[in-house]
Image (spheres, grey):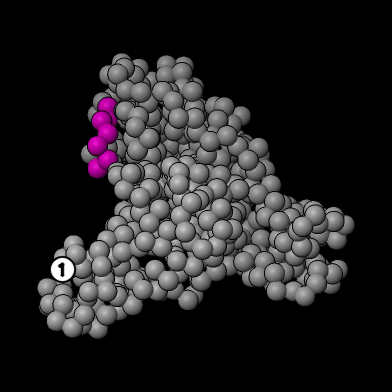
Amino acid sequence: MVLEGLGKSLRDVLERVAKSSQVDEELVKEISKELQRALLQADVNVQLVLEITNRIQERALNEKPPAGKSSRDHVIGIIKKEMVELLGTGKPLELKPQTIMMVGLYGQGKTTTTGKLALFLTKKNYSVGLIGADVYRPGALDQLQQLGLKIGVDVYGEPGNKNAAEIVKNGMKHFADKKIKIIDTSGRHALEQDLIQELIDIAEVAKPEERVLVLDSQVGQQAGPQADAFNKAVGVTGVILTKMDGTAKGGGALSAVARTKARIIFIGTGEHIRDLEAFNSDRFISRLLGMGDLASLVELAKDEIDDEAAMEQLAKNMMSGRFTLNDMYQQMAAVSKMGPLQKVMSMIPGFSNMEGKIDYEESQKKLYMFKVIMDSMTHEEKDDPNKIKGKRIDRIAKGAGVTTADVRGLLKQYHQSKKTLSAMSKDRKVRKQMMKQLGGMDMEGLQDLQ
């Protein structure tokens, strides 16, 4: 999970507030110190940490909670809002026909990120062409072509030609029919005048709507000065922070870039080609605090799952209590398509708080085994799991190459899931919240299901 250490520390602070008998000055000062420790460990600038914790402390002690809201919930809300402010807000990348120019220093993950961005945009139903204008790094064009082949996107390049602007000019003509052109430019170990001139020449030829700076989040607080320098040199319009998974300096990079008023549009969350996430500070902090991010989960589902109508029906079945093993199979297949289990679960409210209690690797294996078991069942059995007893369990286990205990384990999991969903479906508050957060999906009629 992105910024896992910071997320756990912040969730511990919120849990302490939620469990407190009252919110008094002593508690506020103690949680302020805990927040300071958490943010400093995440490499956030000291001065920035003091500013945010002082604001939280002042607001928590002096602001009266709105009508109908407890002082505990009010303090939790203040912490979330201030954290969102810390990371800044910016308009997302506009989804429209355009030219995007990728810039950055050597070794920041620019070419890989170019491929990730191309995949993201193709999933939004845009035709994309990649132009390889990195004329200095050996193998840069080969790498881009391999990425293009992997994601089904055409790549234009001119091996041996050292004139980057000329390559871009020809590439723009070659991809005249493509809705979006993405240019992968050269990098250097430092922002030197020859690199600046080359980028200016390319920009004059391509006239890109977006100049996107790719930054390695492991540079931490130095991401801010780097973003500033590139912006002054070539007019950066957006920033993508790479390697946000498993780095203690990610918080420093995020806050440092936001401090420069730069617009963070994506973060790289892993090595897989799909691991690029549109950045939204409110959603990001919600997930970090264990509040989930169902809106992003729905967007992810729409991008990765082809049969939207089937998913809408599955959602309705889940919330109505009419939940069969066929539904469970669809649910598991959908989760598998959407990436690593830990990433998906972090978007569901409450599951981030289960850190340390869930063995995600073991759960992923069990998910696969359950699908194999269900493949050995008849449609009738999956539609009515109560029929699965005795000899049927023996037959299913043999067909799946597992033990009868494994089959019973699946049935136990199914009954637990059905019981949980049934309880949720009877809770009007939960149904209302689900419909609000799943607003991107056609959930008509869900409010009437009992």
Asked if 257 appears above or below 381 in the picture, the reply is: above
Residue 385 vertical placement versus 172 (above, below): below
Tell me what residue is drawn at x 45 percent, y 47 percent: 445
> Which residue matches tag 1?
376
Name the residue type under label 1. Ser
Residue 34, position as x, y percentages in the image: 71, 68
Q: Position of residue 236 (x, y in %)?
A: 55, 30
Of 317 and 106, nearer the camera is 317
Q: Quadrant of residue 393?
A: bottom left
Foreground: 327 or 236?
327
Q: How many marks?
A: 1
Q: Which residues are magenta?
A: 150-157
Q: Is residue 329 visible?
A: no
Image point 44% across, 25% down: which residue? 96
| Residue sitting nearer the eye, 79 or 315 | 315
**Disc 1 residue crowd, few under 14, some 14–19, many 20+, Cα 10 Å:** some
Q: Residue 446: in sight, yes or no? A: yes
Above-or-below relation of 250 to 362: above
Relative to 26, say whether 276 is above or below.
Answer: above
